Image (cartoon, helix red, strand yellow):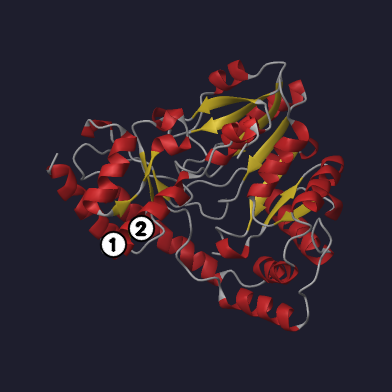
Amino acid sequence: MKFAKRMERLGTETAFEVMAKAKALAAQGKDMIYLQIGEPDFPTPKHIIEAGVAALRDGQTHYSPAAGIMPLREAIVQEVYSRRGVKPSPQEVVVTPGAKPIIYFLIMACCEAGDEVIYPNPGFPIYESVIKFCGATPVPLPLREEKDFRFDLDEFRSLVTDRTSLIIMNTPANPTGGILTREDIEVVAEVAKERNILVLSDEIYKNIIYEGKHESLYGLPGMKEQTVLLDGFSKTYAMTGWRLGWGVMPEELAKRVEKLMINCNSCTATFSQYAAIEALQGPHDEVDAMVEKFRKRRDFIVEGLNKVPGFSCRLPKGAFYAFPNVKGVGMDSQKLEEYLLHEAGVAILSGTAFGEYGAGYLRFSYANSIDNIGLGLERIKEALAKL
């Protein structure tokens, strides 16, 4: 079978590959602990489920507008206004099946061969994958441990050229758990306005933050017209399987993203959009409780990782990932990932799954119980003692 050459440029999300390997080992009888996948292990709050069920019973099982039902788009407008202090119009909102389509549609709509896209590295692997797929040039912006996994402002400025068509920011960040400061995003805004560059601000983890405050690029003066705000429901509301994301962007861009939605998905599942309204407008007690549990797990796993010989780990300020430096083990991080999977029965990810600057690190998702996290750490210590 012949495949298009462009498929050679398309990457993947290694978390799903490692999960498949771990499940295969489990099927063979090996006891596995899963610390690799970025998915809350909590159930979707009951009131959100009930809203989805009610929508199904009410007949909300047909096509909806490609950009999303108006009540949900209006609810997103209110959420953006209350959190960022800037009020978009419903026509600037596009609802998609998951947040990834916003990344894909934006890059396909705005970037082409010869363009350069600056993106965080280590960072969410889909950024680099789609940049390459559309024929643009990925320009990695290193996130360094010594800067608490922020980027160097002067280094950022040096990467911007006349060919830069898009800048991607992510805070709180996957895989590091780092957050950007007000100074960081103000420099990005300054450069973007000076050069007339569009910015994708990925804020999918904005509600899972433990220290400091969430700073949104979208809320800075003059940035509404140059920012695509990316958010969704998977992480905050434990709704990964519902496939619900959204983007807020200038109306002319929204029209083009809507056209891509029509070509690819037709629309987002209608009943799930009614559940999303309840998520935004209903009580947040369960969300708050989830974040507090994540905080306790964060403290527990970081303390434990720092007791593993050859590991050192900073305290992440957001999301639900720990990103320890494992250079002291003396093994390539990708080989270490494989070794711990087979020898310890612990599924984690090499930092290289998130880009070249992730070499020498591992990503642990603490979306698992403290008991399982503790057991996983003990198994890792035992496995490393055999080296």
What's the amino acid at mark 1?
Gln
Residue at image location 33% in from the left, 32% down from the top = 360
Q: Residue furthest bottom?
A: 57
Image location of residue 326, percent across then percent down = 28, 36
Task: Answer yes or no: is residue 221 visible.
Answer: no
10 Å crowding of disc 1: few (<14), some (14-19), many (20+)? few
Image location of residue 377, percent across then percent down = 24, 53
Q: Are marks 1 and 2 in contact (CB under 8 Å)?
A: yes
Camera-side residue: 132 or 140? Answer: 132
Image location of residue 10, percent across then percent down = 58, 36
Residue 256 falls in which quadrant of the image?
top right
Examine the rendered structure and indicate whether residue 205 appears above or below residue 62: above
Residue at image location 55% in from the left, 58% down from the top = 235
Q: Disc count in the image?
A: 2
Residue at image location 77% in from the left, 59% down from the top = 267
Q: Residue furthest left?
A: 386
How far apart are the alpha carbons under marks 1 and 2?
A: 7 Å
Residue linked to disc 2: 24
User: Can you tell which mark lies on residue 28?
Assistant: 1
Residue at image location 81% in from the left, 52% down from the top = 262
Q: Secondary structure at mark 1?
A: loop
**Seen in the image, is 103 located left or right of residue 382?**
right
Examine the rendered structure and indicate whether residue 82 appears above or below residue 189: below
Q: Secondary structure at mark 2?
A: helix
Examine the rendered structure and indicate whether residue 24 appears above or below residue 222: below
